[in-house]
Image (tube, helix red, strand yellow):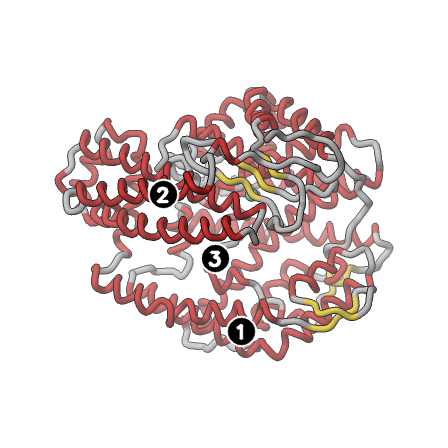
């Protein structure tokens, strides 16, 4: 199948997965073989990790990489198939079988990391410093970072077994309350049941009254559920604090820092620096109010559209993206072109296809694939650039790193995607003649940065205060959560946005708080890092490009601080984020200038 580009809405642009695996039957057979290889690996190496030397560890890692690649390829194939035809029985069966076998394979392989973590430090060091495993040194070292926080095997098993009742049950309850909540709402075509997401979608409507009514309806609908939602959160926070004591974590953010491989003081300084820039937010809110002919923004005006972007058909999007990447680097542009030429993009929206967009890395020995729903909007051009940014990262890293070392952690994963968006944005702004399109583009850029940098910092700060309160022994009820929510948000909105009474329930439906604590700050980090890198690119021009490509090709072979240092981003420098804020200010100035 090829990506013939014919008409609107990316008609006919479907991916060709047969280059990954020829068909579902083959996938089923291959997953059985992979599972057998996994069991053979377990039989050979279980109980032996302590006795390995450099060459034999390298041989074990090479075998592990082959298994990892095959499992990743098969699992990705099943999930990619399903994502464009979610109700297809054959696809659903394949996903179910694959997921089950993946769990079995992971269980069989788990011993390897556990035995590796259990080695004493001198023994481990003599192994990870061996020249034969140099390519996977970071994987080996970083796997051990949880060692001081891991309990004995029976304790870990006990905690794992009580997990469903102690943790997941509260998350499920939260999910049930928030996903089944429906209220009648008239968005203009008569009353219809509205979920939380559907109500929230109206905050981007050009109709002011609709924006206001939808938020009011949301808060009124949430109110009766807030005691249950607060209690779920309170229980989870209490449990996490208890686990932190058992596992020797000094601060509730420490497990997140460890996962992201970022030092806590770097994150603290970043959050303080962001809060020091809320003046930029106030300035933008005032400017936006003026553009909308208002004295002051209401909360429901925050995401009101400015300008009106023109349509962009898929062939034009492809050309624009190619031109924007090619200005930066031929190598990068060629990688992106491969996605189009090799049928590795599925862009046509159709019934049974999942929403949103993603780039799947598939496996280190395969090429990545992009899914999106292209609807001829200017936004879609940015989304396509974003996903191809992930794609160039995966492609370059896979070429240089092993299966165990090519994935970058969450802190840097969104850097190449955001950088690609900035490349596309600059080209579009340079070419675009239509004033309404330009206004929309620039406003979306400013507000996109705000939604990541400022908003996600507010969320992380709110969580910090909730954990601190709970650690003092205060129960987190709806009133107390409302109070810290409003206090932290007030710093961001200042006097420039009027916040309605109902916003006191704004914390209640945010899933990250329930699922993954302090999840959001990694996105702030990645966004500010990208802006800082882009500022350097603007200053240095093509001198910057090879270093950036090296950074992409390094994948996950080092911690963020070490990956960024060669690019001139020094996380120990207290002013490291200043160029990022200067970029944000620059965008606001462009928006104000019109
Ligand atoms: Zn992304």
Q: How far apart in space, not on screen, are marks 2 and 3 (Cα)? A: 36 Å
Q: How far apart in space, not on screen, are marks 1 and 2 (Cα)? A: 41 Å
Give the foreground label among 1 and 2.
2
**In the image shown, does 377 or 2 lie closer to the viewer?**
2
Marker disc for residue 408: none
**In the image shown, does 572 or 419 lie closer to the viewer?**
419
**Helix, strand or loop at mark 1:** helix
Q: Residues within 10 Å of mark 3 (few under 14, many from 20)?
A: many
- Residue 446 against residue 540 in the figure, above or below: below
**Helix, strand or loop at mark 2:** helix
Whichever of labels 1 and 2 marks the residue nearer the N terminus, that label is 2
Residue that numbered label 2 is attached to: 31
Residue that numbered label 1 is attached to: 229
**In the image shown, does 576 or 253 lie closer to the viewer?**
253
Residue that numbered label 3 is attached to: 518
Q: Name which residue lies at 67% across and 24% down.
A: 323
Image x and y of residue 514, in percent: 49, 65
CB under 8 Å between discs 1 and 2:
no
User: Does any portion of residue 575 appear in the rendered image?
Assistant: no
Quarter of image, res 148:
bottom left
**Helix, strand or loop at mark 3:** loop
Image x and y of residue 304, in percent: 77, 54
């Amino acid at each position: 199948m090829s990506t013939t580009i014919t008409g609107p809405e990316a008609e006919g642009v479907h991916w060709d997965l047969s280059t990954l695996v020829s068909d579902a039957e083959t996938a089923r057979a291959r997953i059985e073989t992979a599972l057998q290889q996994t069991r053979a690996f377990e039989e050979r190496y279980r109980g032996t990790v302590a006795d390995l030397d450099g060459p034999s560890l390298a041989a074990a890692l090479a075998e592990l990489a082959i298994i990892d690649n095959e499992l990743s390829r098969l699992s990705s194939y099943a999930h990619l198939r399903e994502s464009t035809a979610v109700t297809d029985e054959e696809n659903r069966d394949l996903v179910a079988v694959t997921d089950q076998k993946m769990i079995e394979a992971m269980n069989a392989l788990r011993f390897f990391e556990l035995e590796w973590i259990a080695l004493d430090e001198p023994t481990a060091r003599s192994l990870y410093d061996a020249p034969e495993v140099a390519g996977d040194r970071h994987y080996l070292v970083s796997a051990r970072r949880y060692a001081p926080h891991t309990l004995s095997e029976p304790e870990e098993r006990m905690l794992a077994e009580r997990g469903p009742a102690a943790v997941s049950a509260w998350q499920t309850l939260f999910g049930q309350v928030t996903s089944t909540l429906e209220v009648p709402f008239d968005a203009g075509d008569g009353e219809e049941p509205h979920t939380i997401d559907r109500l929230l979608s109206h905050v981007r409507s050009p109709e002011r009254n609709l924006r206001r009514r939808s938020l009011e309806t949301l808060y009124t609908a949430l109110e009766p559920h807030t005691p249950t939602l607060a209690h779920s959160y309170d229980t989870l926070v209490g449990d996490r604090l208890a686990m932190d004591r058992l596992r020797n974590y000094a601060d509730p953010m420490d497990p997140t820092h460890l996962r992201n491989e970022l030092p806590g003081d770097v994150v603290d300084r970043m959050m303080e620096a962001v809060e020091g820039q809320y003046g930029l937010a106030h300035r933008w809110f005032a400017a936006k109010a003026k553009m909308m002919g208002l004295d002051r923004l209401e909360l429901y005006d925050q995401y009101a559209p400015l300008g009106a972007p023109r349509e962009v058909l898929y062939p034009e999007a492809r050309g624009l993206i190619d031109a924007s990447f090619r200005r930066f680097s031929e190598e990068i542009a060629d990688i992106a072109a491969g996605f189009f030429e090799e049928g590795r993009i599925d862009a046509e929206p159709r019934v049974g296809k999942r929403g949103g967009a993603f780039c799947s890395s598939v496996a280190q020995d395969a090429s990545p694939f992009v899914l999106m729903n292209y609807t001829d909007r200017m936004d879609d051009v940015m989304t396509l650039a974003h996903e191809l940014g992930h794609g160039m990262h995966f492609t370059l890293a896979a070429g240089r790193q092993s299966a165990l070392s090519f994935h970058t952690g969450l802190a840097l994963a969104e850097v190449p995607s955001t950088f690609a968006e900035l490349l596309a944005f600059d080209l579009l702004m340079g070419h675009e003649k239509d004033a309404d399109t330009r206004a929309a583009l620039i406003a979306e850029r400013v507000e996109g940065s705000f939604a990541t940098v400022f908003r996600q910092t507010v969320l992380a700060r709110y969580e910090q205060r909730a954990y601190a309160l709970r650690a003092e022994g205060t129960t987190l009820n709806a009133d107390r959560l409302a109070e810290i929510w409003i206090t932290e948000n007030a710093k961001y909105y200042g006097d420039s946005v009027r916040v309605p009474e109902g916003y006191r329930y704004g914390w209640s439906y945010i899933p990250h708080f329930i699922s993954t604590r302090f999840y959001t700050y990694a996105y702030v980090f990645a966004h500010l890092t990208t802006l800082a890198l882009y500022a350097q690119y603007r200053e240095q021009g093509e001198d910057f490009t090879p270093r950036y490509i090296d950074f992409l090709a390094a994948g996950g072979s080092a911690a963020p601080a070490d990956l960024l240092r060669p690019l001139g981003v020094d996380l120990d420098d207290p002013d490291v984020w200043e160029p990022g804020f200067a970029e944000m200010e620059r965008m606001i100035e462009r928006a104000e200038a019109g």
